Amino acid sequence: MSSVVQLQNIHKVYDSGEVKVHAVRDVSLEISTGEFMAVMGASGSGKSTLMNLIGCLDRPTEGSYHLDGVNVAELDRNELADLRNQKLGFVFQGFNLLSRTTALENVELPMFYGQKQVSAKVMRERAMHALEIVSLTDRADHFPSQLSGGQQQRVVIARALVNEPQILVADEPTGNLDSKTSVEILGVFQKLNDAGITILMVTHELDIARFCRRNLVMRDGRIVSNETVIDRHVASIEMERLLKAEAEAKLTEMT
Amino acid sequence: MRSALTALGIIIGVAAVIAMVSIGNGAKNQIESQIASLGQNVIIIFPGSSTSGGARSGWGSRSSLTPEDAKAIVNEVPGVVAASPEIRDRSQVLANGSNWNTQIQGESPEYLSIRLWELDDGAMFTERDVKGFSKVAVIGQTVSNQLFINEDPVGQTIRIRNIPFKILGVLKSKGFNFFGQDQDDVVIIPYTSHLKRVARRQQLNSIIVQAISPEAIPQIQQGITDLLQQRRKGREPDFTVRNQVELAEAATATSNTMTSLLGAIAGVSLIVGGIGIMNIMLVSVTERTREIGIRMSVGAHGSEILLQFLTEAVLLSALGGTIGIALGVGVSEIMSQVNGWPTLISPTAIVVSFAVSAAVGVFFGYYPARKAAQLDPIEALRYE
């Protein structure tokens, strides 16, 4: 399998004048196509910074980063934006949907900023297709305020997918969701990954990380472990377990 | 609601500009027609030197113009078609059992042709009447309407300072002059009769002269000045020679200043409106920081963000401009109905106002739009 992400000796230093923060120290990493990787660590471990670097929202101070063969370090602001548009898909903890536009229009957003302009009809078709993948076509014309947390996150995932990116980057995607909805969303990720989409996910919860195939642990800006997950959670099974537990809880309450 | 309030500044500014320009245009038009109604190629000579604005300087007491001056002008200055010595007094007149306070003007028979003033009825007095100090008169429409409501004034008697004058004719309506005076409120009699029988003095108020063509006017003005100077044998010049246009300019000088001042105020209000737009756009950019971050994360270029916010600013200002134009036109119409002032809504003013309001949007919207475009995506996404 080819590698989508190639990081070599990456450093990121934030220099705010008085204090220098060495957020990422000498990270080298390869992520292959079809990978489903969790990046874990305490706050301050550098995992969010690493995600921002991989997501081309920020540039490394030192080191090289090749995304799908493209050397990111040589790109300017606008070229980075194009890269984000074409090769990356973002899923955020806080959803970050435009509240005054419908689900469908939110999913269409990346296509507006695409290099090649497509017709409105094609945009709608592609957006509907993305919503289909996350099983949300019946809510296409709803506004974010009319959707549940899980549904909103699914819209975000659809938006991330609509331009057929190389890699999906998710930052604590289940952070704002309850346990049942979290499993639901992780089920969507697993389904996407099984179909071949590369996913990188930041989380601080072990439970969530066990849904992935690989776990990366960071501490003080370095990678301290990079291991395959044994006894991976499968979303459908976990969901059943949760529902059963819920039913039992209700039963005990009722007696 | 917030947009409506912001646009209000632009709306008021543009409405004010349109209203000002329309009123100004209407006034200009009216003045131009009033200039025309003075006559054609008219030059007026006033006693008193032109220390202040010519038409408005006070009449000198010692200086004088005489009918002989007028005769000399006709005979000796080339290009002069006709001249009429003018003497004016206000007086009560009696006719038909009623009285009326009006302006008595002593003129020569050429006066009507100099002023391009036609008769509605009857005839003008003649040179013979002038020579004979005849007690004859020609009255204006207002006097006729006041004193002879349902009758024909021609042939009737009108008493001026208790002297009976026979009405020979009635003038057509001329309207108001640019001093705001009713030109139809007049009784015209031979200047000789006026000087001898009615006036309490022997000096003329002015001499009105008709030049042969507009091109000849400057030359003729100079000729008259030289002639009168000569006749006064080197004394201090005690007269002023003004042509139609100069008189109009003097009369409109004040209103021009007013219009410019009001236009400047309107302009200032437009700028204030623009500042309002900049303010609201800055607030909008701050409120939508997260949104900008989202757009950047999915691939928006800085320039696309800039364009998005700039467009919003321009739409706001252009909409304000459109409403302002409609409001300005409405106000102009109402003002012309209510006040009797003429207004002329000029298409140029509308186009320019619209363009200016759009430009205000671009100018004042640029800084906030640029701020939006320069946001760092990571920080923008983190913004609460």
Image: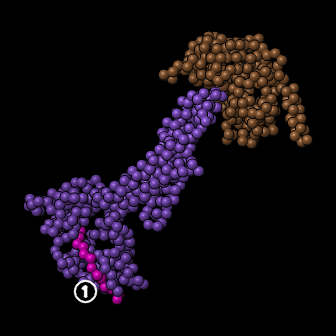
Chain colours: A brown, B purple
In the image shown, does A92 or A132 lie closer to the viewer?
A: A92
B286 or B52, which lies in front? Answer: B286
> Based on the displayed image, in which of its 4 quarters is residue B96 positioned?
bottom left
User: What residue do we see at 37% from left, 76% from top?
Assistant: B142
Task: Locate residue B245, reporting x and y percent.
Answer: 30, 57
Answer with left or right where residue A230 lies relative to residue A70: right
Magenta stretch in the rendered image: B77-97
Q: Amino acid under label 1? A: Asn
Dividing the image into 4 quarters, which one contains the C terminus of chain A?
A: top right
Counting labels gives: 1
Q: Is residue B232 left or right of residue A131?
A: left
Residue B96 on the magenta segment: yes
Q: Main secondary structure of the magenta part?
A: strand
* Residue that mark 1 sits on: B162
Q: x, y (%) of residue A250? A: 87, 39
Residue B288 vs B124, above or below: the answer is: above
Residue at the image position 48 percent from the left and 53 percent from the top: B12
Q: In terms of depth relative to the viewer, which is nearer, A245 or B153?
A: A245
Residue drawn at x 24%, y 75% as measured from the top left? B89
Q: Quadrant of residue B240?
A: bottom left
